[in-house]
């Protein structure tokens, strides 16, 4: 039986002709597609969420190439080599990116359900001018030999594009290793291709086990959330898989207070726990998506903290070559002396509590 999700992958929307079935493609969009010669594409499902007439649609801007990608004043060259510490002394397979002692990112595939224009791995998955060798067996062997690794983050590309059999194999192999305590999968498919969450997938990666599986997806705008997404998330949770979100802060897409709050509230409404919001990384060709660094902390201050439940609060982080660096709004402690702290809340009201000596 051919499943709906494989049909969607086969019928990827990646030409102007196919795109024109969903939207009125603008002249700028046509010119960018024709001149940039960049890999792009989306599932038909995600294309169906696009606004037909508005080129500023948040879904269109994440999917359709833009001439602005030619500008690169602030992006770093060879970004991924820097970011993933590929030039350090430890010898690791290409598939293993390491920034921490106890956990690694394990790249198992280079294809995606959509090719995000803001992807920090653009050099690899979109432009493909960085050639790496993602040998799953080699990666598994490396992890097996490194007993300090507790936590494996399976990434890509989009790992959920692997077949149920391959995913089942990968998860089973990791679960056989005595030092592994948890497995995480980073996948945009619950958002861009929720049809992927099938009974077969649930069987392959879900179910009760000593070693839990977490999925972190990427949803950047409330418009990306549909009834299909809600059902897919429910299905994942019903077989024991926790679902979190890792959004990217994108200029003109989610960097205003109302959209930012609506995104995080809507995620919780469909049972997704906001985990991170990433600063849009300084990879090449995405200056037009990038805000000032402080913007994310300001949004947490103005849109989330106090304005809505603590469950809706992601951590805002800058992902760097030395790990993720959290950046929090810091308006709480107004004053501190020997006797007391003066504190401020989200409404600008003040209160005092005693200063407890050590
Ligand atoms: C993001 C990342 C991790 C996971 O970080 P958490 O803060 O645990 O989610 C691990 N390794 C690398 C290389 C990463 O980029
Ligand atoms: S799904 Fe992830 S890896 Fe793929 S293009 Fe988007 S951000 Fe990049």
Image (tube, rainbow, N blue to C red):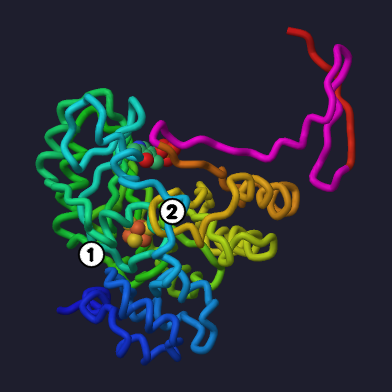
Seen at 11% across and 39% down, the residue is 138
Q: Which residue is mark 2?
A: 243
x 54%, y 84%: residue? 54
Q: Position of residue 219 (x, y in %)?
A: 48, 62
Which sits earlier in the primary sequence, circle 2 or circle 1? 1
Identify the secondary structure beneath mark 2. Answer: strand
Could you tell me which residue is drawn at 69 percent across and 64 percent down?
258
Q: Is disc 1 surrounded by few (<14), some (14 to 19) or many (20+) residues within 10 Å?
A: some
Relative to 227, is 317 above or below? Answer: above
Nearer to us in this view, 325 or 102 = 325
Whether residue 234 sits left or right of residue 77 in the image: it is right
Within the magenta stretch, is there residue 330? Answer: yes
> In front: mark 2 or mark 1?
2
Q: Position of residue 189 (x, y in %)?
A: 35, 64
Tell me: residue 144, above or below residue 275: above
In the rendered structure, the answer to whether residue 24 lies left or right of residue 300 reads left
Magenta-colored stretch includes residue 345: yes
Q: Quadrant of ligand 1?
A: top left
Is the N terminus in the top left, top right, bottom left or bottom right quadrant? bottom left
Q: Quadrant of the C terminus?
A: top right
- The circle drawn on residue 67 is none
Q: Which residue is mark 1?
A: 200
Q: Which residues are magenta?
A: 321-348
């Amino acid at each position: 039986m051919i499943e709906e999700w494989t049909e969607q992958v086969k019928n990827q929307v990646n030409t102007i002709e196919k795109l024109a079935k969903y939207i009125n493609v603008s002249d700028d969009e046509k010119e960018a597609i024709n001149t940039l010669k960049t890999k792009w594409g989306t599932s038909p499902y995600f294309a169906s969420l696009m606004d037909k007439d508005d080129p500023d649609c948040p879904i269109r801007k994440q999917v359709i190439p833009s001439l602005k990608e030619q500008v690169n004043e602030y992006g770093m060259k060879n970004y991924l080599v820097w970011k993933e510490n590929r030039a350090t002394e430890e010898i690791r397979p290409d598939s293993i990116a390491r920034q921490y002692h106890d956990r690694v990112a394990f790249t198992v595939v280079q294809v995606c359900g959509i090719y995000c224009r803001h992807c920090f791995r653009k050099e690899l998955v979109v432009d493909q001018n960085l050639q790496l060798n993602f040998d799953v067996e080699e990666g598994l062997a490396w992890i097996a030999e490194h007993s300090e690794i507790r936590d494996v983050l399976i990434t890509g590309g989009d790992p959920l594009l692997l077949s149920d059999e391959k995913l089942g194999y990968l998860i089973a192999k990791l679960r056989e290793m005595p030092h592994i305590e948890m497995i995480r999968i980073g996948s945009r498919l619950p958002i861009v291709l929720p049809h992927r969450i099938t009974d077969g997938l649930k069987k392959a990666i879900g179910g009760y086990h000593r070693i839990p599986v977490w999925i972190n997806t990427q949803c950047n705008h409330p418009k990306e959330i549909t009834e299909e997404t809600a059902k897919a998330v429910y299905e994942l949770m019903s077989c024991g898989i926790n679902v979190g979100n890792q959004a990217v802060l994108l200029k003109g897409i989610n960097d205003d207070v109302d959209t930012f709050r609506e995104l995080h509230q809507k995620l919780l409404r469909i049972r997704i726990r906001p985990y991170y919001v990433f600063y849009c990384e300084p990879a090449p060709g995405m200056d037009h998506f990038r805000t000032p660094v402080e913007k994310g902390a300001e949004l947490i201050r103005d849109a989330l903290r106090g304005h809505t439940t603590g469950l809706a609060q992601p951590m805002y982080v800058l992902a760097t070559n030395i790990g993720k660096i959290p950046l929090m709004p810091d308006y709480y402690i107004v004053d501190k002396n020997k006797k007391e702290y003066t504190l401020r809340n989200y409404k600008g009201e003040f209160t005092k509590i005693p200063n407890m000596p050590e």
